[in-house]
Image: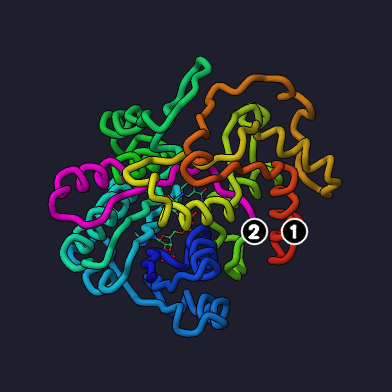
């Protein structure tokens, strides 16, 4: 089987490509720039013609993927902007939503072999900010972010804009499938991960090229967070697990039409500093050691579906992924490590 992976040079996508190839699939990756993505040809050269790259310059254009979808059996759509350098909501929302509808339209028109589309969504399309502890499941939607962006426009903070972009993109995908159900021979699966951590397979030589989720660890360890921010919480999952989730979602029959949260555990930002201290990592920020011990998390998520439908029970300890990340920063010569 052949699978189309969009944004193949991205942090997650590189792992997705690797896992598909290891599982025996052929992969066609789309990228915006071949020169920036040359490392992929080196990395996957052992797979010969089972791996190829094609250029799709503007994913928002109608018909952008018409050629790319021809002959593939499945599509993993990962390309979507994940950064906070935004001046207005459309900077993220247009490529997220139109990139999604554009590839689905191409699959509708030219993807006669396509049986399944896997959309890389996010946990931010699921949970909403809350003051009281809540447990979120795949039936929840982050409508609050969409509303906030509608009300505040360009004054909305970039993270909220990102949340709205992922929520609107995933909704657009489900709406597309509902509207075209009688015409399409394929179904949809959405994967909803939290912060994705673990080593990058790309050379990413400078700190400017680091992706947003790895930057989250780097900034925390190098002291960019106030003590108040360190009391904030989040959840995370290993990049290899999310990539494996995409592969399993491609052939797991029961995954059809499902959103699937794939997460490992929750954390406080202070926990990262405390674990770094335990690991003996030099020069990292210390914050207020131990100050988050025993505090319950406000945002909790259900993980049953990933286990039932994909057989995934991501259990890597946070300490391990932290050590892996720091090794990766050292390898790349990032300042501070
Ligand atoms: P990266 O920034 O490493 O990769 C993003 C990919 O999308 C790149 O190939 C990039 O191309 C492409 N892309 C971004 N904007 C555009 C655009 N306007 N037009 C065309 N292509 C574009 O991100 P990640 O690997 O971290 O994220 C991949 C996916 O996973 C995204 O959909 C993201 O929302 C989702 N996700 C990520 C999480 C994380 O913690 N990393 C958590 C949950 C979901 P180029 O290199 O040319 O810019």
Ligand 1: quadrant of the figure: bottom left
Q: Can you give x and y, in whole percent of width and height, for residue 252 in the image? A: 42, 51
Q: Earlier in the sequence, mark 1 or mark 2?
A: 2
146 or 235, which is in the foreground?
235
Magenta extent: 170-198
The residue that appears at 53% across and 64% down in the rendered structure is 19
Answer few, some or many: residues within 10 Å of disc 2's Cα (few below 14, many 20 plus, some between 14 and 19).
many
Q: Quick check: 179 above or below 332?
A: above
Q: Can you give x and y, in whole percent of width and height, for residue 291 in the image? A: 74, 24
Q: Which residue does the numbered mark 1 point to in the structure image?
A: 327
202 or 65, which is in the foreground?
65
Q: Is residue 256 visible?
A: yes
The residue that appears at 36% across and 41% down in the rendered structure is 258
The secondary structure type at the circle numbered 1 is helix
Q: Is residue 293 left or right of residue 195?
A: right
Point out which mark residue 198 bears.
none
Q: Is residue 337 magenta?
A: no
The residue that appears at 26% across and 67% down in the rendered structure is 113
The secondary structure type at the circle numbered 2 is loop
Q: Can you give x and y, in whole percent of width and height, for residue 201 in the image? A: 60, 66
Q: Which residue does the numbered mark 2 point to in the structure image?
A: 199
Q: Is residue 213 left or right of residue 118?
A: right
The residue that appears at 50% across and 70% down in the rendered structure is 24
Answer few, some or many: residues within 10 Å of disc 1's Cα (few below 14, many 20 plus, some between 14 and 19).
some
Q: Is residue 195 magenta?
A: yes
Q: Ligand 1 within 8 A of label 1's CB?
A: no
Can you say which quadrant of the picture contains the N terminus?
Answer: bottom left
């Amino acid at each position: 089987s052949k699978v189309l992976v969009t944004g193949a040079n991205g942090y997650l996508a590189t792992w997705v490509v690797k896992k598909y190839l290891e599982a025996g699939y052929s992969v066609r990756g789309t990228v915006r720039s071949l020169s920036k993505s040359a490392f992929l040809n080196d990395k996957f050269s052992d797979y010969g013609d089972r791996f190829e790259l094609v250029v799709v310059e503007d994913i928002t254009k109608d018909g952008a993927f018409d050629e790319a979808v021809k002959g593939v059996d499945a599509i993993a759509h990962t390309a979507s902007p994940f950064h906070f350098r935004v001046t207005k909501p459309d900077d993220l929302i247009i490529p997220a939503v139109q990139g999604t509808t554009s590839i689905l339209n191409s699959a509708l028109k030219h993807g006669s072999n396509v049986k399944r589309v896997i959309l890389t969504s996010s946990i931010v399309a699921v949970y909403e900010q809350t003051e009281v502890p809540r447990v979120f499941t795949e039936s929840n939607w982050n409508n609050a972010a969409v509303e906030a962006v509608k009300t505040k426009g360009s004054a909305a903070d970039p993270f909220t804009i990102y949340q709205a972009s992922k929520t609107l993109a995933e909704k657009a995908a489900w709406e597309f499938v509902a509207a075209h159900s009688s015409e399409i021979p394929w179904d949809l699966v959405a994967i909803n991960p939290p912060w994705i951590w673990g080593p990058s397979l790309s050379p990413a030589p400078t700190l400017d090229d680091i992706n947003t989720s790895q930057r989250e660890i780097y900034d925390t360890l190098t002291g960019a967070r106030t003590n108040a921010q360190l009391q904030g919480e989040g959840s995370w999952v290993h990049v290899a697990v999310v990539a494996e989730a995409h592969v399993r979602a491609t052939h797991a029959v029961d995954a059809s039409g499902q959103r699937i949260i794939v997460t490992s555990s929750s954390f406080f930002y202070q926990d990262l500093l405390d674990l770094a201290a335990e690991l003996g990592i030099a020069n990292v920020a210390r914050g207020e050691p131990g100050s988050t011990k025993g505090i319950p998390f406000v945002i909790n998520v259900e993980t049953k579906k990933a286990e039932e439908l994909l057989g995934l029970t991501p259990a890597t300890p946070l300490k391990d992924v932290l050590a892996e990340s720091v090794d990766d920063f050292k390898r790349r010569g990032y300042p501070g490590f």
